Image: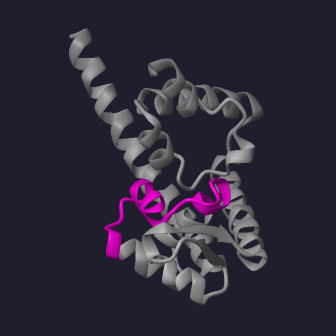
Amino acid sequence: MHTETRAAGNRRSANLLGALALETAGALESAARTVVGQAGAASAALVTIGAHPDRSIEQLRLPLGLSQPGAVRLVERLVGAGWVERSGAAGRRGLELRLTASGEAVLHDMLAARRAALAELIEPLSEREQAQLTRLLEKLLGARAGDRSDLERICRLCEWRACDGCPVAGAVRQAG
């Protein structure tokens, strides 16, 4: 009987997590779309380029899960918007990507909008509950990380400066 009760509790927890994940994804997409004018890969690209300037398109596409042509099109859109500049070797593959001053401003605004959307989601929790949630999220996220590519994929929209002691980076270090 205890096993059945635990299984039902696990299903309920997983189901609730799924519902919250969808709500969170929607809130983040809306926040990014408000600032960037699009969500998903464009926002993740700005975060990734901001955190790791001078990477190539190839190094950008992997954590974003884009094809090479898709990454090139995304970079073209970001360059066209004036948010990213390319420099370095001739040819698209060898070019290094950097945020422009305008790109830095958009990234700052997008992260602020993201921060506000997430704060609204956890606002119903007390400080103690938020601390509990933080510990649980650290444990869950750390369990999802195996290598550097996991770190870059999982944290592709993270506000890296806000995450001292990143549980994903810590798990990657432990595994390596």
Tell me where residue 19 appears, x and y as whole percent. Answer: 40, 51
Tell me where residue 139 appears, x and y as whole percent. Answer: 51, 25
- Quarter of the image with the N terminus in it: top left
Tell me where residue 143 appears, x and y as whole percent. Answer: 43, 27
Seen at 67% across and 85% down, the residue is: 82
Q: Main secondary structure of the magenta part?
A: helix
Q: Toward the viewer: 119 or 13?
A: 119
Q: Toward the viewer: 161 or 14?
A: 161
Farthest residue, direction bottom = 80
Tell me where residue 73 appears, x and y as whole percent. Answer: 42, 81
Seen at 23% across and 13% down, the residue is: 3
Q: Toward the viewer: 79 or 131?
A: 79
Query: Which region shows up in magenta?
Result: 47-69
Q: Toward the viewer: 165 or 126?
A: 165
Picture quarter containing residue 52?
Answer: bottom right
Picture quarter containing residue 169?
Answer: top right
Seen at 45% across and 76% down, the residue is: 92
Q: Is residue 154 left or right of residue 128?
A: left
Tell me if residue 40 can be seen.
no
* Magenta-span inclusion, residue 124: no
* Magenta-span inclusion, residue 53: yes
For residue 77, above or below residue 123 = below
